[in-house]
Amino acid sequence: MSNHELDEMIKALSHPVRRDILNWLKQPEKYFADQEHPLSFGVCAGKIDQKTGLSQSTVSNHLAILQRAGFISSKKVGQWNFFSRDEVAIQAFLTRLQQQL
Amino acid sequence: MSNHELDEMIKALSHPVRRDILNWLKQPEKYFADQEHPLSFGVCAGKIDQKTGLSQSTVSNHLAILQRAGFISSKKVGQWNFFSRDEVAIQAFLTRLQQQL
DNA sequence: ACTATATATCTTTATATTGCGATTAATCGA
DNA sequence: TCGATTAATCGCAATATAAAGATATATAGT
């Protein structure tokens, strides 16, 4: 993980809503039990919009930032886009931060 | 550590210069070998100014942000102000992040 | 082909952050 | 006391980030 990538990861975490999203995605069955599609796809963008209470475009941007940082990945199914955590990347980040800091 | 404190810590880390400073303070004898005062006091603000290449006021602000976040503490001796890492706080942060994330 | 739905992208506005020079306050040495 | 040194604070300009509405694109159903 390059310095620049580390920077993007930390910046991605430096907004409370993005940390909330990462947390919700940790337990989709707890936070998105009402989703009609299987949670195995991930969590649908619209569901996350609802949960935050922010506008669709704002949340779409937050998701893009988390994805660019590598914390989440997306899977497009039909007209929907499903997001889920990348646990490997998250662990790698924590390990790197421990060395770095 | 409250949510707000965690937020301040992550924000404090979200600037490369501040991460640099934390790193330099990890090995003062390596990065500030030329300091006239004993390194046991910590590292003198002016030395950090020099190392960053930024203005005195800018670095003073970065140091204040790191200190408010709890990552460093300062000790005033005469007209100088010496900074050093708070290893306990840093470890607490890493632990908290591991749970949180 | 048309309409509805989902979501990314664009544009604009508001706010926060960064950086610098100038000032201020504290301490020191002569 | 006076001038020099250190470092925090203030005021301002530049830049970055966040939020929303509007638009564009893709897919789905009729």
Image (tube, coloured by chain):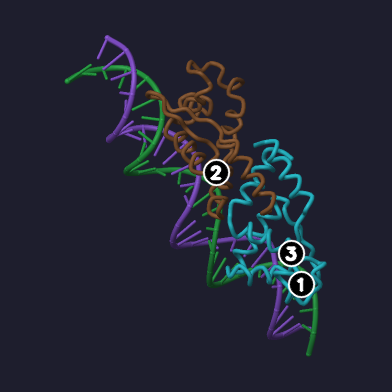
Chain colours: A brown, B cyan, C green, D purple
- For mark 3, give the secondary structure: loop
Residue B66 in the image: x percent, y percent?
Answer: 68, 55
Q: Which residue is mark 1?
A: B79
Amino acid marked by disc 3: Gln
CA distance for labels 3 and 2: 28 Å
Q: Position of residue A79 (x, y in %)?
A: 37, 24
Q: Quadrant of residue B7?
A: top right
Residues packed near mark 2 inside 10 Å, few (<14), some (14 to 19) or many (20 plus):
many
Q: Is residue B38 above or below residue A24?
A: below
Query: Which amino acid type is shown beneath numbered disc 1?
Result: Gln
Mark-to-mark CA distance, 2 and 1? 39 Å
Q: Nearer the viewer, mark 2 or mark 1?
A: 2
Pointer 3 and pointer 2 on the same chain = no
The reply to whether callout 3 and callout 1 are in contact (CB within 8 Å) is no
**Chain bearing mark 3:** B
Question: Which residue is labeled 3 in the image?
Answer: B27
**Looking at the image, is mark 3 or mark 2 nearer the viewer?**
3
**Amino acid under disc 2:** Ala
Q: Dot 1 falls on which chain?
A: B
Is residue C28 or residue B10 the one in the foreground?
B10
Quadrant in the picture for the C terminus of chain B: top right
Q: What residue is drawn where x is 73% and y is 61%?
A: B26
State the SS at label 1. loop
The residue that mark 2 highlights is A12
Please state the horizontal and vertical placement of residue B76, each as a whole percent of the image. 79, 66
Q: Position of residue D24 (x, y in %)?
A: 27, 35
In the depicted view, which residue is nearer to us: B2 or A65? Answer: A65
